[in-house]
Amino acid sequence: MVTRLSHLFLRTLRDDPSDAEVTSAKLLVRAGYVRRQSPGIFAWLPLGLKVRARIEAIIRDEMVAAGAQEVLLPALLPREPYEATNRWTEYGDGMFRLQDRKGADYLLAPTHEEMFALLVKDLYGSYKDLPVTLFQIQDKYRDEARPRAGLLRGREFTMKDAYSFDLTDEGLERSYQVMRDAYEKIFARLGLEYVIVKADAGAMGGSKSEEFLHPIGVGEDTFVRSAGGYAANVEAYVTPVPDVLPIEGQPEPVLLPASDTPTIETLVAHANEIAPRDGAPWTAADTLKNVVLALTHLDGTREIVVVGLPGDRDVDLKRAEVAFAPAEVEPAGDDDFRKHTGLVKGYIGPQVLGAESTTGIRYFVDPRVVDGTAWITGANERGVHVSGLVAGRDFVADGVAEVSDVRAGDPAPDGSGPLETARGMEIGHVFQLGRKYAEALGLKVQDENGKLATVTMGSYGIGVTRILAILAEAHNDEKGLAWPKNVAPFDVHVVATGKDEVAYDLATSIVAELEGERFEVLYDDRPKVSPGVKLRDAELLGMPIVVVAGRGAADGVVELWNRASGERRDVPVAELLEAVRAI
């Protein structure tokens, strides 16, 4: 197939759009693949749709090869199924809600677990119908508070989501592994580097969750991995718990007057000055920092909680959101402290905290704060701290909360060595949902004994439009895009330059020969466009191979570009087809 650029709906831009933050967003708009309509929402133009279709074709190939069957569900969905699973509320402000003219509630689907479960419930009723795996490629909608980075994080995006249905847990394990293997094949075909990490299931729920992350500097996720093979999203990292220490025989707490110690660093320096210990000086890790967080629950109520963690650690709000899900989490503000006068800001200690205390404020601790550990912390009196406060003797927590930051050098929980940290972008996610949705929606089938059994489900998502942006992010140079050959909108971009008809005649014959060999060709035949503009457009659009018929046309020579390697060389027309095949 040949597409003439003179007829293509395309307008390239010389300058980066002012609202684009990352390279992929700049280049995809400048090259005319997409066009921004509003924050986080884009129109797809012919070139962008061709790339998207190629990505979708690879995904479809592997889904079908894995035994999944394609369906297509609507994006506009009724409220009732999401009420049954509590996700109408749990999704909070991230869901687009609307009403029809009769006042009935609907949503724009952020995901489709409920509707797939109901589809299977409607049509299947026996164990003989299972297992079955269904998939679709469909648009999703999430009301991102800060849509940014172009297609990497939008309000409307395209996903491939698949759902497996099995009678037994063993069947779910098999279906899960089949989908997981298919994902590895998909990302290999797309040429995408990936790391499989343990992940938090979040609002999806389920017993097992893994993310496929593409390591990239602009990634929104931090993940950790060890040389021994452990890998996890920081939200899913579980802190190794130290051994409990004996409490008996430990000295009583000692008050430390500390009138001017507003930071952990000044507190440590003060403690080393007025109460030095034998063996080693006090460090930030010996202090217990009590951080006040505000939780906003689904019903709108606001609760203050305090988390005690070693003073050399900070709170990671993303981990805190997982620890206290589905509540929203933020640092407590001045109004919160004014309402809770029992909290002496800067000198908070655990002695007056806990659900059963006089303050009634729930108190949680980091997993490192085990019974028998002794700490320097606040005395709940302005200008006073205390040392030697022993967990399990002098204070007791209401629970453990994984909210502290995860750092390079921390131990992997499986003992496989120290961790390194990296940034990544999620390109796929697989879940073992279990029976959460099936139970809520009454998805049961008759088993071999004629009794009703609840079906168990898996959910498997791939971000189609996000992958397109990641490929653009990974394959470009200072001049423009450089698509991999398996997703490029065209195989070869032929450019005729100059005013000499010889160049256009030669280009036309080259195009005909390439078409005959089943190459998809973009032909820049624009008659009144300067060579400089045509060549800049060829660099910007990023086809894997560019053939320029220009000054050497009369001698039967063209310039051949390998866009990925940057190599450019003159090639006799008689050798061109073989040279194109080689690239």
Image (tube, rainbow, N blue to C red):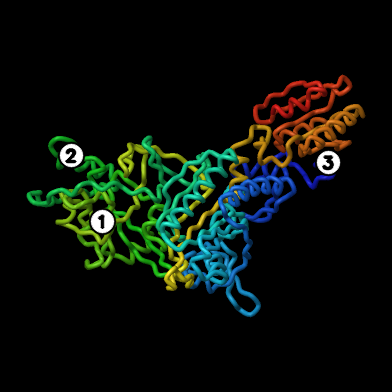
User: Closest to the observer: 255 or 108?
Assistant: 108
Distance between the alpha carbons at the discs numbered 3 and 1: 71 Å
Question: The residue tagged with tag 3: helix, strand or loop?
Answer: strand
Are discs 3 and 1 less than 8 Å apart at CB?
no
Q: Is residue 453 left or right of residue 136?
A: left
Relative to 391, residue 117 above or below: below
Residue type at the position of mark 3: Arg
Name the N-terminal-most of marks 2 and 1: 2
Q: Which residue is mark 2?
A: 273
Outermost residue, bottom direction? Answer: 102
Residue at image coords 46%, 44%? 196
Q: Residues at badges 2 and 3 in contact (C-beta under 8 Å)? A: no
Q: What is the secondary structure assignment of the residue under circle 1?
A: loop
Pick the front one: 394 or 371: 371
Looking at the rendered structure, which numbered label has been put on residue 4? Answer: 3
Q: What residue did someone put label 1 on?
A: 348
| Residue shown at the point (8%, 51%) measured from the top left | 248
Q: Nearer the viewer, mark 2 or mark 3?
A: 3
- Say which of 548 and 151 sits in front: 548
- In this orientation, does residue 23 appear? no
- Residue 486 circle label: none
Residue at image location 51% in from the left, 46% down from the top: 181
Q: Earlier in the sequence, mark 2 or mark 3?
A: 3
Q: Secondary structure at mark 2?
A: helix
In the picture, the quarter occupied by the C terminus is top right
Q: Quadrant of the N terminus?
A: top right
What is the spatial separation of the Cα atoms under label 2 and label 1, in whole angstroms? 21 Å
Name which residue type carries label 2.
Answer: Glu
Task: Answer with the quarter of the image where residue 578 lies.
Answer: top right
